[in-house]
Image: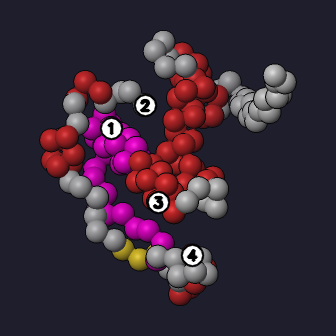
Amino acid sequence: MARTKRERVSVRLEAEVNSIEGHLLKYLKADPIIPPRESALRALKAFYMPWALEGEVDEVQLQRLASTAVEELQFRIFQIQQRYGAGASPGYITPAPRQGVGAASAPNGMMSPVAPAPTIAEMRQNINAEDLDDF
């Protein structure tokens, strides 16, 4: 049986030690529980995965990925609000739904309001406070 060579994609991140990015990378490297690679990939997946797989997976899978990404991001927003006292946002905005042409089809590139995210009280009911720093 012939073995196929695995192809890999890599990204190397470097920053000046005292820059904001440097502090971020030092923080990720110092976490004793979650390896920096895992932390960075989790954040990247939540932020970019639906776009990265658009056209690569079927619409049902893409919708699931997008829902998971939104949940991850909303959870992280909740964590930041709880930890640092940042006030709740009045609501989220999102591009107008695609109509076959893409986001550029929205008039003047305007964003349309959608129903606000769950309130902090609603999120508290579903989140264990012990898990707040697991990102």
Quadrant for residue 112, please give it.
bottom left
Marks 4 and 2, how far apart at CA: 30 Å
Residue located beneath label 2 in the image: 135
Residue 50 vs 9, above or below: the answer is below
Write the start and end of the magenta stretch as one range.
Answer: 71-96
Q: Are marks 4 and 2 in contact (CB under 8 Å)?
A: no
| Any part of residue 17 in sight | yes
Nearer-N-terminus badge (3/2): 3
Quadrant for residue 81, please give it.
top left
**Where residue 79 is drawn, which disc sits there?**
1
In reply to whether residue 122 is colored magenta, the answer given is no
Nearer-N-terminus badge (4/2): 4
Marks 3 and 4, how far apart at CA: 20 Å
* Crowdedness near tag 4: few (<14), some (14–19) or many (≥20) residues, C-alpha within 10 Å: some
Nearer-N-terminus badge (2/1): 1
Q: Residue furthest top?
A: 32
Nearer-N-terminus badge (3/1): 3
| Image depth: mark 1 or mark 4 in front | 4
Instruction: Give the SS element for disc 1.
Output: helix
The amino acid at mark 3 is Val
Residue 85 vs 15, above or below: the answer is below
Q: Percent x, y for residue 27?
A: 54, 23
Nearer-N-terminus badge (3/4): 3
In the shown orientation, is residue 2 left or right of residue 103?
right
| Image depth: mark 2 or mark 1 in front | 2
Q: Residue furthest front?
A: 1
* Crowdedness near tag 3: few (<14), some (14–19) or many (≥20) residues, C-alpha within 10 Å: few
Residue located beneath label 3 in the image: 60
Residue located beneath label 4 in the image: 103
